[in-house]
Amino acid sequence: MHADLLDLEVQLLVLKHGRQRIVRSLAGISEVSEADIERQLSAACSAKSAKERTSPPTITELVERAEITSSSKRERVATLLREFEQKRFLPERRLVDRFCFEHGSKVAAKSRTAALPTVLKILTTLSDDDLDELLDSVRNGGGSSGFAQLAAAIMDRPTKAG
Protein backbone atom coordinates (compact mmCIF):
# COMPACT_ATOMS: atom_id res chain seq x y z
CA MET A 1 0.00 0.00 0.00
CA HIS A 2 2.76 2.44 0.99
CA ALA A 3 4.79 1.55 -2.11
CA ASP A 4 1.78 2.30 -4.31
CA LEU A 5 1.33 5.67 -2.64
CA LEU A 6 5.02 6.46 -2.98
CA ASP A 7 4.94 5.52 -6.67
CA LEU A 8 2.01 7.87 -7.22
CA GLU A 9 3.72 10.70 -5.35
CA VAL A 10 6.93 10.26 -7.37
CA GLN A 11 4.95 10.21 -10.62
CA LEU A 12 3.24 13.42 -9.53
CA LEU A 13 6.59 15.06 -8.75
CA VAL A 14 8.00 14.03 -12.13
CA LEU A 15 4.93 15.41 -13.90
CA LYS A 16 5.04 18.62 -11.90
CA HIS A 17 8.79 19.35 -12.01
CA GLY A 18 10.20 17.17 -14.80
CA ARG A 19 12.56 14.23 -14.67
CA GLN A 20 15.77 16.25 -14.97
CA ARG A 21 14.87 18.49 -12.01
CA ILE A 22 14.03 15.43 -9.87
CA VAL A 23 17.33 13.74 -10.82
CA ARG A 24 19.21 16.95 -9.96
CA SER A 25 17.50 17.13 -6.55
CA LEU A 26 18.18 13.46 -5.81
CA ALA A 27 21.83 13.94 -6.73
CA GLY A 28 22.08 16.95 -4.40
CA ILE A 29 20.38 15.18 -1.49
CA SER A 30 22.43 12.00 -1.95
CA GLU A 31 25.66 13.89 -2.60
CA VAL A 32 26.34 11.94 -5.80
CA SER A 33 26.52 13.04 -9.41
CA GLU A 34 23.50 13.25 -11.68
CA ALA A 35 25.20 10.65 -13.90
CA ASP A 36 25.28 8.22 -10.96
CA ILE A 37 21.56 8.72 -10.36
CA GLU A 38 20.85 8.17 -14.08
CA ARG A 39 22.95 4.97 -14.06
CA GLN A 40 21.07 3.66 -11.02
CA LEU A 41 17.73 4.46 -12.65
CA SER A 42 18.79 2.73 -15.88
CA ALA A 43 19.99 -0.33 -13.97
CA ALA A 44 16.71 -0.53 -12.06
CA CYS A 45 14.70 -0.23 -15.29
CA SER A 46 16.72 -2.90 -17.11
CA ALA A 47 16.53 -5.27 -14.12
CA LYS A 48 12.76 -4.83 -14.03
CA SER A 49 12.39 -5.47 -17.77
CA ALA A 50 14.65 -8.55 -17.54
CA LYS A 51 12.34 -10.01 -14.88
CA GLU A 52 9.32 -9.37 -17.09
CA ARG A 53 10.95 -11.14 -20.05
CA THR A 54 11.70 -14.39 -18.25
CA SER A 55 9.67 -17.14 -19.80
CA PRO A 56 8.72 -20.40 -18.11
CA PRO A 57 11.21 -23.23 -18.60
CA THR A 58 10.68 -25.62 -21.50
CA ILE A 59 10.02 -29.34 -21.04
CA THR A 60 13.64 -30.07 -22.01
CA GLU A 61 14.94 -27.63 -19.38
CA LEU A 62 12.65 -29.09 -16.71
CA VAL A 63 13.81 -32.63 -17.46
CA GLU A 64 17.47 -31.55 -17.45
CA ARG A 65 17.01 -29.86 -14.07
CA ALA A 66 15.43 -33.03 -12.69
CA GLU A 67 18.80 -34.77 -13.21
CA ILE A 68 17.37 -38.12 -14.26
CA THR A 69 20.32 -40.45 -14.79
CA SER A 70 18.66 -43.10 -16.96
CA SER A 71 18.22 -41.94 -20.55
CA SER A 72 15.20 -44.22 -21.08
CA LYS A 73 13.50 -42.82 -17.99
CA ARG A 74 14.35 -39.27 -19.07
CA GLU A 75 12.74 -39.97 -22.46
CA ARG A 76 9.57 -41.40 -20.86
CA VAL A 77 9.24 -38.49 -18.43
CA ALA A 78 9.78 -35.94 -21.23
CA THR A 79 7.11 -37.65 -23.34
CA LEU A 80 4.62 -37.60 -20.46
CA LEU A 81 5.34 -33.93 -19.81
CA ARG A 82 4.75 -33.10 -23.49
CA GLU A 83 1.47 -35.04 -23.29
CA PHE A 84 0.65 -33.06 -20.15
CA GLU A 85 1.22 -29.80 -22.04
CA GLN A 86 -1.05 -31.03 -24.85
CA LYS A 87 -3.69 -32.01 -22.26
CA ARG A 88 -3.55 -35.66 -23.26
CA PHE A 89 -2.06 -36.70 -19.91
CA LEU A 90 -4.00 -35.49 -16.87
CA PRO A 91 -6.13 -33.13 -18.97
CA GLU A 92 -8.12 -31.70 -16.07
CA ARG A 93 -7.10 -30.11 -12.81
CA ARG A 94 -9.09 -32.64 -10.77
CA LEU A 95 -7.15 -35.47 -12.45
CA VAL A 96 -3.87 -33.76 -11.58
CA ASP A 97 -5.02 -33.45 -7.97
CA ARG A 98 -6.03 -37.12 -7.85
CA PHE A 99 -2.75 -38.25 -9.46
CA CYS A 100 -0.72 -36.26 -6.94
CA PHE A 101 -2.83 -37.46 -4.01
CA GLU A 102 -2.46 -41.10 -5.10
CA HIS A 103 1.31 -40.65 -5.10
CA GLY A 104 1.46 -38.98 -1.70
CA SER A 105 1.81 -35.36 -2.80
CA LYS A 106 -0.44 -32.43 -2.17
CA VAL A 107 -0.86 -29.83 -4.88
CA ALA A 108 -0.90 -26.23 -3.71
CA ALA A 109 -1.03 -24.89 -7.26
CA LYS A 110 -4.09 -23.08 -8.51
CA SER A 111 -3.91 -24.37 -12.07
CA ARG A 112 -2.95 -27.47 -14.01
CA THR A 113 0.15 -25.83 -15.41
CA ALA A 114 1.29 -24.55 -12.04
CA ALA A 115 1.16 -28.15 -10.79
CA LEU A 116 3.69 -29.26 -13.43
CA PRO A 117 6.71 -29.24 -11.05
CA THR A 118 4.85 -31.52 -8.62
CA VAL A 119 3.84 -33.86 -11.45
CA LEU A 120 7.45 -33.92 -12.66
CA LYS A 121 8.72 -34.74 -9.18
CA ILE A 122 6.28 -37.66 -8.96
CA LEU A 123 7.17 -38.93 -12.43
CA THR A 124 10.88 -39.01 -11.54
CA THR A 125 10.12 -41.33 -8.61
CA LEU A 126 8.15 -43.85 -10.67
CA SER A 127 9.62 -47.04 -12.08
CA ASP A 128 10.03 -47.58 -15.82
CA ASP A 129 7.11 -50.02 -15.73
CA ASP A 130 4.86 -47.43 -14.08
CA LEU A 131 5.90 -44.81 -16.64
CA ASP A 132 5.20 -47.27 -19.47
CA GLU A 133 1.77 -47.93 -17.98
CA LEU A 134 1.03 -44.19 -17.94
CA LEU A 135 2.26 -43.83 -21.52
CA ASP A 136 0.07 -46.74 -22.64
CA SER A 137 -2.89 -45.15 -20.91
CA VAL A 138 -2.29 -41.88 -22.77
CA ARG A 139 -1.82 -43.65 -26.11
CA ASN A 140 -5.04 -45.61 -25.63
CA GLY A 141 -7.03 -42.49 -24.83
CA GLY A 142 -7.01 -43.01 -21.08
CA GLY A 143 -6.31 -39.31 -20.78
CA SER A 144 -9.67 -38.43 -22.31
CA SER A 145 -11.31 -35.61 -20.46
CA GLY A 146 -14.63 -36.04 -18.74
CA PHE A 147 -16.14 -33.82 -21.41
CA ALA A 148 -14.86 -36.09 -24.21
CA GLN A 149 -16.29 -39.14 -22.43
CA LEU A 150 -19.63 -37.40 -21.90
CA ALA A 151 -19.79 -36.31 -25.54
CA ALA A 152 -19.01 -39.87 -26.68
CA ALA A 153 -21.73 -41.25 -24.40
CA ILE A 154 -24.28 -38.76 -25.73
CA MET A 155 -23.37 -39.65 -29.29
CA ASP A 156 -23.51 -43.36 -28.32
CA ARG A 157 -19.90 -43.95 -29.34
CA PRO A 158 -17.30 -45.71 -27.24
CA THR A 159 -14.30 -43.65 -26.17
CA LYS A 160 -10.79 -44.85 -26.84
CA ALA A 161 -10.47 -45.69 -23.14
CA GLY A 162 -13.61 -47.74 -22.88
Image (tube, rainbow, N blue to C red):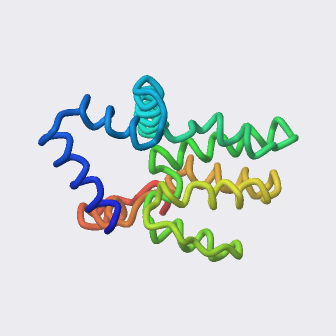
Query: Residue 41: x and y, percent?
Result: 41, 33
Could you tell me which quadrant the N terminus lies in? bottom left
Q: Quadrant of residue 134?
A: bottom right
Query: Residue 119: x and y, percent?
Result: 62, 59
Q: Is residue 85 left or right of 105 when viewed as pictured?
A: left
Number of numbered labels in the structure image: 0
84 or 118: nearer the eye? 118
Query: Residue 147: x and y, percent?
Result: 32, 63
Q: Is residue 77 above or below residue 150?
A: above
115 or 148: nearer the eye? 115
Q: Is residue 119 left or right of 160 when viewed as pictured?
A: right
Q: Residue at x 19, y 46 (%)?
A: 13
Q: Residue at x 60, y 38 (%)?
A: 59
Q: Is residue 18 left or right of 45 when viewed as pictured?
A: left
The outermost residue toward the left is: 16
Query: Residue 133: x and y, percent?
Result: 70, 56
